[in-house]
Every structure is written in structure tokens, then in C-alpha cells.
Image (cartoon, rainbow, N blue to C red):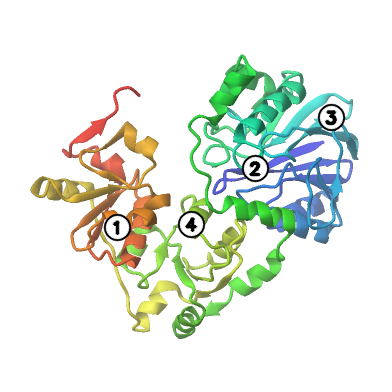
Amino acid sequence: MVIEQLYTGCLAQGAYYIESAGEAAIIDPLRETAPYLRKADRAGARIKYVFETHFHADFVSGHLDLARKSGATIVYGPNAHTHYDVYQAQDGETFTLGRVTIKVLHTPGHTLESTTYLLLDEDGREHAIFTGDTLFIGDVGRPDLAIKGDLTERDLAGMLYDSLHAKILPLPDEVIVYPAHGAGSACGKNMSKETTDSLGNQKRYNYALKAETRDEFIRQVLSGLSAAPAYFAENARLNKEGYESVDRVLERGSRALSPEAFEAAVNETGALVLDVREAADFARGFIPNAINIGLNGQFAPWVGALIADLNQPLALVTPAGQETETVLRLARVGYDHTIGYLEGGFDAWRQAGKETDTVKSIPADEFARRRSDSPDAMVVDVRKLTEFELEHVEGAENLPLDTLSEHLAELRSDEPVYVHCAGGYRSMVASSILKARGFDNVVNVEGGIAAIRKTGVPIVADVTH
């Protein structure tokens, strides 16, 4: 028996490859099929099943393309009503995979169709559970994403409590927990950086599993939830209704466009220019009105949070050699309408004599000097409210990046606006948005609060934390 976790840090997502006696199953695959097909081919195994734990909201699953290419059967648990053919399993049903068995445990709560898959080894022993978003390491799935009709988040939280206590907690302590996500995912609020653990450890240390009553559990899991990213509902819809083949998306999006063709395509389609280079490179020069969301950070979730329309045409400026990777990472979260990329990158644009823009970016010590000279200058902190409350520059305004566009009226475009975050990634994204909206005096503070803290700039700290 082989169990392999294929973890993707950008999405904080874990897919799983299980193999036994020449048969393989994939659980919660990402949209690209090659890694799974390649693993099975190298092992001489046939992919028999693609198991889905639920309708994912934070990424578009690869189940449709993978099933089409491998001949595998797509399996969902109860209550999963799709617009394409699947096998809808019943609670307690079992599936044979080589010499092991996979048992369906219907665990509604995160969503109504949420299902955990229990792996029984060659001797029939309970070996591992693949919990999807039902149980994470250190947390449980948020119950506010699948509210429908008269169903409330409290109702779903109660279902989740019942699922955990009836289906998960009675299992032996040595059972291994394999969740769909880890720290950084918006599908929970307290996830560990660890991506697997024993169930026994989770019983001892997971706050949600230690709740003494159903009401206490509901109260705990519903407190402190941030707003769900805007793209979640659309990704869940795509996973339920179906989507275009990723091969066609990649073919269309990977077109190389000369500077002239790139400019013409943007003007013709109304495409958003998405520049995925690192912040420092973007600051030194970019195409006017381009938005910078760097590949080196949590790229896909920030695209989902900041680009509201999944059908928005996108034209890419990328580092050399990362053009197709960018198209794929966009497709993972449902952004299928990339029209091509700038051949030769930004250097080709500049060499063609096209118009360019820059973002003024200064080190923290220069910011400190400027702050001392102009203590009333506008400072915008684009971190989350929880980060801001722990510590912030005295007098700074907190405008979290994901809601920045809703608060532009609070800023004056004719005065310098100093923007910072924790380390510099989000502040350059914010600076690019402000520049595109006419804030020509935006100044990015390099290194964020981590660098500012080392200067003499007054910091307000929450001593209660």
C-alpha cells in the first residue's frame, strides 16, 4: 500500500495518491492531471477511482479531466448533486482498491455533502482518514460556506459536531488524519502548519474536538470567522456544474504576444494586465494600470480575493519560463480566460518604446525619516485587522488588502500615501491597485512592519496578546 500526499503550498491544499496491487485512487485532485497520471504510469497502476470529499470552494478540482483521461469513476458521498455523471456513494459503502478498502463516512457540517474516506489496510485495520474540510490539523472546517434556504451556519455547525462525534472520534487514536488543507487556507481559522497527524493527538490538542458540549462547539467554531473570499461561491459552482478542459485553457492562455499584439489584445478585449513578477521588479517598471500579484506569494488566493469576475480576460506579464505555470495556477481557482502573455516580458515592452510606470519604493529607515518630518502623512497598513490590532504604526489607517478598493474614497490622491504590510508582498499589490486608480503619490515601504519595527517609528502594541 502506498499513500502519498501531494501538497501545494500556494493553495495550502493536499491531494492524495493511494495505490495497492496495481490499482490507484486520487482524493481531491488539483486541476492539472499530469502528476497523477504520471505517478500511476510509473507504478504500472490503473487509476480506478477519483474520490471527492465535497464541492471545494477554494479551488477547481481536476476530477473531470482526470476521470476522462484515466477512465476512473468519480465518487462523491451523499447529497452531492452534480450536472455530470458520478457515482454517489451511500454512507458506510465500501470500495475495493487492490488489497485495501475505502469506506465512506458521510460527515456533513462544512457542507451537506462533506464526506470522509476511511482507509482499511490489507488486514482490515482502520489505518487513515481523508477528511477533506471536515477535520483539519488543529481545526475543523468552517460551517458558514454552504448556507442555503432556511439552513443557518449554526445548523451546519451542529451537523459538524454530530459528524465528528459519531463518525470520527470513535475511531482508534492511531488512525492517521489526512486533511485537504493546512495553515494559510481560508477554509478554516486555526489550522496547523503540519499537514498530517494522528487522530489521538487531535483529540488531545484540537480546540474544537475538546469542546465539552454541542453548544460550546458551535460557539467556538463560529467565533472569529473572517468573510469568505469572493471567488469561493463560483469555484463551488464550477465543481458542481463542470468546467472547460484545462488543456484548452492552457492552450489559449499560453499564446506568446509581441508588445504590439499584446497592447492590441488588451485594448480589444478589455483584459486586465496581471503582472506576476516579484515586487521589486514590478516597482522598477511596469505597464500602466497593471496589477501586481506575485507568483512568489499566495498567488491564487489573492487573485481570487481581488479579481471579482472569473470571466475577466487576463493578459499576463511573467518572469521568463513561468508563462504556462501562471496560466495553470490561475486555472486552479477558475480564472480560465487568460488571452496570452507578453513575449519577452517587460523588457520587450520597454525596448519597444511603450509607455511605462513605476512605484516609488523606499526602505524602512527612509520611511522613518519622512515620518519624522511629516508626522501627519497618510500611512496605510494593508494587513488583516487581527495583525493590525497586535501592533501597528502609530496613526496608521488599517485598510486590509482584500477590501482596499472599497475604501479608496478615504484616501487623498494628491498627497503621499505610504503603504506597508508585514513583509512587502501585499503592500506592492496594494500599491499597484492604487496606482491604477490614479494615486500617483503612493510610496511602498519595503520590508513592511518587520522592517519598520527596527526603526524609531512609534509602534502601538496590544499588550493583551
* Residue 341 place in picture, x, y as percent: 51, 73
Q: Earlier in the sequence, mark 2 or mark 4?
A: 2
Q: Which residue is the site of mark 4?
A: 295
Q: Amino acid at mark 2?
A: Ala
Q: Are marks 3 and 4 in contact (CB under 8 Å)?
A: no
Q: Earlier in the sequence, mark 3 or mark 2?
A: 3
Q: Secondary structure at mark 4?
A: loop
The residue depicted at 50 percent of the width and 29 percent of the height is 223
Q: Pointer 1: residues within 10 angstroms few (<14), some, or many (20+)?
A: few
Query: What is the distance, in whole Å, between disc 4 and disc 1 at their CAs?
Result: 29 Å
Q: Which residue is the site of mark 2?
A: 146
* Residue 268 place in picture, x, y as percent: 50, 82
Q: Which residue is the site of mark 3?
A: 120
Q: Amino acid at mark 4?
A: Leu
Q: Which residue is the site of mark 1?
A: 409
Q: Are marks 3 and 2 in contact (CB under 8 Å)?
A: no
Give the mark toward the camera: 1 or 3: 1
